[in-house]
Image: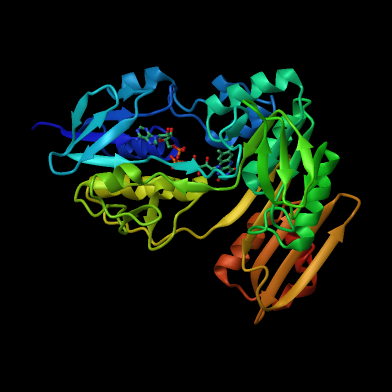
Amino acid sequence: MARQRLVIVGNGMAGLRFLEETLERARGRFEITVVGAEPVAAYNRVLLSAVLAGEAAAVDVLLRPRRWYAAHEIDLITGQLVQVLDGGARCVRLQNGRTIPFDILVLATGSDPITLSVPGSDLRGVATFRTLCDIAAFERFAAGRRPAVVIGGGLLGNEAAHGLARRGVAVTLVHLADRLMERQLDAEGAALLAEAIEAKGVRVLLGANTRAIRGSCEVEAIELADGRVLKCGLVIMAIGIRPRAALAASGGLGTSRGILVDDRMETSLKGVFAIGECAEHRGSCYGLVEPCYEHAKVAAGAIVGETIGYRGSVLATNLKVSGVPVFSAGDFEGPGEAIIVRDVGVPSFRKLVTRDGRLTGAVLVGDVVDATWYWELIRSRKLVTPFRDALAFGRAFAEAA
Ligand SMILES: Cc1cc2nc3c(=O)[nH]c(=O)nc-3n(C[C@H](O)[C@H](O)[C@H](O)COP(=O)(O)OP(=O)(O)OC[C@H]3O[C@@H](n4cnc5c(N)ncnc54)[C@H](O)[C@@H]3O)c2cc1C
């Protein structure tokens, strides 16, 4: 029997995980082609921050060597953008003109960084932080030792600022909101994070709105709405991401913010799936890697006839932000009783919110050893009343109590 032609667009973290999940279930059943726009095979994007900080080399973050693809008879095409998706003819066309037919298509096209459209945003030296190629450009810049400005105090902005500071660049992090990572942290946790980041050599400016980027051909400074001017030779915009759904939309697939999928990760066109950051499931798009892996598993199951359905991902943030461990989960700003413990010496901060005797939200900065336990308590909705007084001191203490 002829093998089904399986084409995967995007060789990022979701695309590769989908391949692995598929090979585990049905090795040899599909004739597989993978097309990736980046010049290298899939790598661990989460570790880009470590590469930028000089703590890992580009080669260390590659997830599978090319010989792995060859050993599984996967035709891996890198450095080629898929430009056309023809749902009627069931084929995709690459930028070099090659047409590849498919029986099953998986879109794993990730996201694009959002950029600010202010005067000067097209100057040389204005960059985003998403790929290994971006880092190569930052490294060339870092060698020149001019100051840099990072716009955006979310995860990526913090990581970019920290990485550049580790390379000896004078960095200012400017953020529009009045606290860093405002979606993951409450005010006090964010203040502690800001202190920790400043201690690592990054200057943090909050409530700072970028009005323009100045320069003739290259960046020379950024100008804030309050009139302050920050001299710099590099501006990194890290203000958010947008699912890459244009290819799907041009091929007639249903899209909204992302590519619309059902509980099998199948799009509006039968046999065409979307996974990872480009997918939109029941109104949600995700920007962390765990949901992307869940998508990959569900889609790999779907193409071999499994019936597991995806119900959406419950998110907890458990990250190292600029070297500072940060965990947040659940509803930590809603109604309820907040237990707050701050240890200035460590430094660490814990905020636990309980409602009706149950833990509903948690924020930890600095010391996150009990993150998994708190996460289990939130998800299981277990009664914490019997050990409430010990809750903030962690599992070992609470169990002893
Ligand atoms: C610096 C940084 C740090 C991060 N840190 C964390 C972290 O600590 N924890 C966490 O959970 N998440 C983190 N993330 C997010 C995480 O990396 C993403 O959620 C994950 O990579 C998404 O996987 P994906 O496969 O959907 O997209 P991607 O990994 O971006 O892969 C998409 C691929 O598709 C390619 N592509 C797009 N369109 C086409 C086309 N038309 N033709 C061919 N190829 C195409 C792209 O070039 C790209 O290679 C971080 C991200 C960055 C940038």
Q: Position of residue 178 (x, y in %)?
A: 74, 58
Q: Position of residue 18 (x, y in %)?
A: 36, 39
Q: Name the residue located 59 percent from the left edge and 44 percent from the top edge.
A: 118
Q: Name the residue located 33 percent from the left edge and 23 percent from the top edge.
A: 77
Q: Is residue 254 above or below residue 387?
A: above
Q: Nearer the viewer, residue 74 or 373?
A: 74
Q: Position of residue 172 (x, y in %)?
A: 77, 39
Quadrant where the N terminus is found in the figure? top left
Q: Residue furthest bottom?
A: 356
Q: Residue furthest right?
A: 345
Q: Is residue 255 above or below residue 122?
A: below
Q: Name the residue located 25 percent from the left edge and 36 percent from the top edge.
A: 84
Q: Name the residue located 83 percent from the left edge and 43 percent from the top edge.
A: 198
> On the picture, is 218 further left or further right than 268?
right
In this rendering, does residue 372 appear at all? yes
In this rendering, does residue 366 appear at all? no
